[in-house]
Amino acid sequence: MKKLAILGSTGSIGTQCLDIIRENREKYSVSALTCGSNTDLLEQQIKEFCPEIAVTESEEDALNLSKKYKDTEFFWGKKGLIEAASSECHMVMNALVGMRGLEPTYHAIKAGKDIALANKETLVAGGQIIMQAVNDNGVRMLPVDSEHSAIFQCLEGNRGRNIRKILLTASGGPFRGYTADKLEMVTLKQALKHPNWSMGKKITIDSATMMNKGLEVIEARWLFDVDADHIEILVHPQSILHSAVEFEDGSVIGQMGVPDMRIPISFAMAYPKRQKSSEPGPDFFGKASCLTFEKPDPEVFRCIKIAYEAIKAGGTYPAVMNAANEVLVGLFLDGRIRFTQISSTIEKILDVHKAEYNIELEDILEADKRARTETFRLVDL
Ligand code: NAD
Ligand code: MG
């Protein structure tokens, strides 16, 4: 039996991870479940999966639940997430959204746990420190993001072979093909309508701005130790090829499947095995359908350009970019700024940032905090 701690168990990835556990009860048990404010769903999950530890964002929620569920120990806030991440288990599934995922990931690695990582912000903000900790502690870091799961699978049996480039696919989001002028007019409702994937709100907006792909370039840079110059974004609206790797001999290996996050989640959970799925694979083979590929326009989707610049500049730049993006996406979701203010404000923040290099975890947390304050100051609502 594999024991899992699931951070962010009430979210899009977290609930799909629990779906897989539900279908494979003989293979998995749950040590910890955590949520933000969605305590109703957490309660249902506690009843069904009987974790030893459960965590809520607020102290009040944790204390209320602890009166009802005597077999589960309750914690709250950041300390609670770290407690869950270090709980007695084989693997930590980090399905938290945002920078709050960084510290629990770090502590889980230090506690010797394998990580299934959906929380890409962990690697964007702290990639160098996290991958160093992975190496030092001899744990596995298994990507859950579909593109990175694809790349990981393409590299199976090819470790040590020279990579010419990584082809990171992108659906292009709801505004694919838009001009910069047209992007000025888009609404929140339009931005929340992703063509292929149903996901949490933050990543849905990141997909619309294409910052999601920028974050993923940085995620790939750290996971696979490949320079950003060797990572190319390819817009592929059908979301069937989940990414590919070109090797030095010109051979390209890709991974395909229907756009269903349960495939990469299940792959990370079961690795090195594969788990049987009841869902059919893609049905386009033999039909008159096609897969198309085009280049994104980084002048229109400026977040792509910003992310490449941030990772090339290094140090605290990616953490600052990520922090500003999180604040701005939140403001956009609250209807307080326009869509294009997300990229234009991040650009301003990065322009004035004085980076630190040679960074420790504390420096990243500090840079993140300052960037958030600075972002609020700049938008001046
Ligand atoms: P989501 O918003 O659906 O879920 C986020 C989880 O974090 C929820 O359990 C929520 O309760 C919890 N949370 C939110 N605020 C919190 C707080 N203040 N304290 C503690 N917990 C809090 O997000 P998601 O779509 O599942 O995405 C999770 C991560 O996976 C993100 O980093 C995202 O980029 C990545 N990802 C998601 C998908 C997808 O299909 N949803 C695909 C690839 C990568
Ligand atoms: Mg992805």
Image (tube, grey):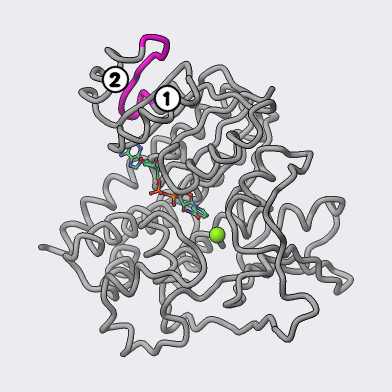
275, 215: nearer the viewer: 275
| Residue lying furthest right | 249
The x, y position of residue 219, in whole percent, is 56, 54
Q: Which residues are magenta?
A: 70-80
User: Quick check: is 79 in the magenta stretch?
Assistant: yes
The x, y position of residue 155, in whole percent, is 79, 55
Q: Is residue 8 above or below residue 284?
A: above
124, 145: nearer the viewer: 145
Q: Examine the rendering and report whether any part of residue 358 can be seen.
A: no
Residue under the image location 34 percent in, 59 percent down:
325
Tag count: 2
Q: Residues within 10 Å of mark 1 (few under 14, many from 20)?
A: many
Query: What element does badge 2 sit on?
Result: helix
Relative to 146, 307 lies left or right: left
Q: Quadrant of residue 329?
A: bottom left
Q: Amino acid at mark 1?
A: Ile
The x, y position of residue 202, in whole percent, is 37, 57
